[in-house]
Amino acid sequence: MNTAAGNTLAPRPLDGITVISLEHAIAAPFCTRQLADLGARVVKIERPGSGDFARGYDQRVRGLASHFVWTNRSKQSLTLDLKQGAADDILQSLLGQADVLVQNLAPGAAARMGLSFEALHERFPRLIVCDISGYGEGGPYEKKKAYDLLIQSEGGFLSVTGGPGEDELAKAGCSIADISAGMYAYSGILSALLLREKTGEGSRVDVSMLESLVEWMGYPMYYAFDGATPPPRAGAAHSTIYPYGPFPAGDGGTVMLGLQNEREWAAFCDKVLLTPELAVDERFSANFKRSANREVLRQIIVDRFARLSTAQVIARLEEAQIANAWVNDMQGVWDHPQLKARDGWREVDSPAGKLPALLPPARNAAFEPRMDAVPGLGEHTGAILGELGFGAEAIDRLRAAGVV
């Protein structure tokens, strides 16, 4: 694993930007971690004693939670009980020095605390406020609780994911509703920073998990436009293109492959199945026919692959220039040769010691992303309060009172 940095002296895009985040779980932390990747200082405000509840999801990373390690590197942790009056004074002082406030508290909670954009804009006109919620402001679902799986359901994702049976609905194996909201919050904040350069004023970014995921559902929604039949659930296969999905090999392995056009179909029949006459079989002579007759075609493919190992199938696919992939488990991804060859891994510090971390996917040769430690709960409380002018005795009193 390579721990060497690139040009660490080169400026990063968000150097000098300060982000205050009232965040928990995934959506907001994923957003702010990416801001930190670009150089922003992110002050993560957490509950004294317990912190972000994602810290307690599991203990899979040497005692730390997997979600938390993934979404919280390069941040500073400040413990603050926002229900106490003294905490509000500290928060207001922080906001007076900040560029961005991000929050994904319960619906309406930020506004009740005086942290709506309208209230803050009067005092801090350059402050950008990003509100992340399940359903967004307004509408009948405004105050409805929202978790990732529930949004996958409301957004129609579950209706097109899983097997064909009525009881074969399947969720995504990662938190895609949270991730999509975090991505739109991240890009929305970047656009708000650019807008501030033009106007001199901050603006509000309102991110809904539902709208974020529905944006990603564009293909199945338009496929079912105007009351048309939606795409069927097809497991790991493509619902409308065939053959496109997983197929077993003779050694017990699985190969993922995908065909996109008739040229590839002919090459697949000739060089992979060694049955060139199949390419002109009337049952399979166009994609819509192959999709309609997928059960028959699948059996033909499975019978041919049964004589081959996984590696042999992939070798034939490569020779025919047919897109293919290994079906990796998590260890296979940790060990992926392409990630290693592209020098994609770094090490970051954490309360549990050094941990591997993947470079941000959007690499820019002009700078090295920030890859700092995953913070312990309240690790930076004393230092941040010191910056605000609190002396050691004052900090001790705040600690004794449970404010921090």
Image: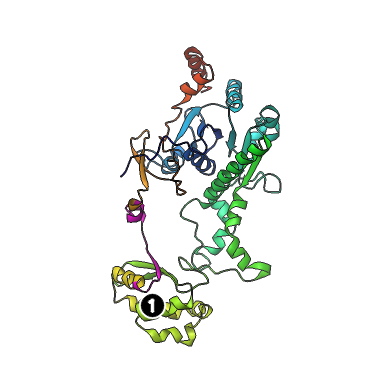
Q: Report the residue at 57% width, 57% height from top.
A: 216
Helix or strand or loop: what does disc 1 sit on?
Answer: helix
Position of residue 197 measured from the top left corner of the image (x, y, whole percent): 63, 37
Does residue 299 appear in the picture of this structure? Answer: no
Looking at the image, which is closer to me, 190 or 393? 190
Q: If the image is split into quadrants, where does the N terminus sit?
A: top left
Q: Is residue 342 left or right of residue 222?
A: left
Rate crowding at label 1 as few (under 14), some (14 to 19) or many (20 or more) other CA atoms within 10 Å.
Answer: some
Q: Report the residue at 67% width, 32% height from top.
A: 112
> Is 272 a magenta residue?
no
> Is 321 a magenta residue?
yes
Does residue 322 appear in the picture of this structure? Answer: yes
Specify how the rendered protein is coloured.
Answer: rainbow
| Occupied quadrant, residue 272 | bottom left
Looking at the image, which is closer to me, 217 or 81? 217
Q: Is residue 296 left or right of residue 229?
A: left
Q: Report the residue at 47% width, 82% height from top.
A: 284
Q: Amino acid at mark 1?
A: Ile
Position of residue 176 measured from the top left corner of the image (x, y, whole percent): 51, 52
Q: Which residue is mark 1?
A: 301
Q: Which residues are magenta?
A: 319-339
Position of residue 45 measured from the top left corner of the image (x, y, whole percent): 52, 31
Position of residue 215 measured from the top left corner of the image (x, y, whole percent): 60, 56
Q: Is residue 13 above or below residue 222?
A: above
| Occupied quadrant, residue 350 | top left
Q: Is residue 34 above or below residue 249?
A: above
Q: Is residue 232 left or right of residue 57?
A: right
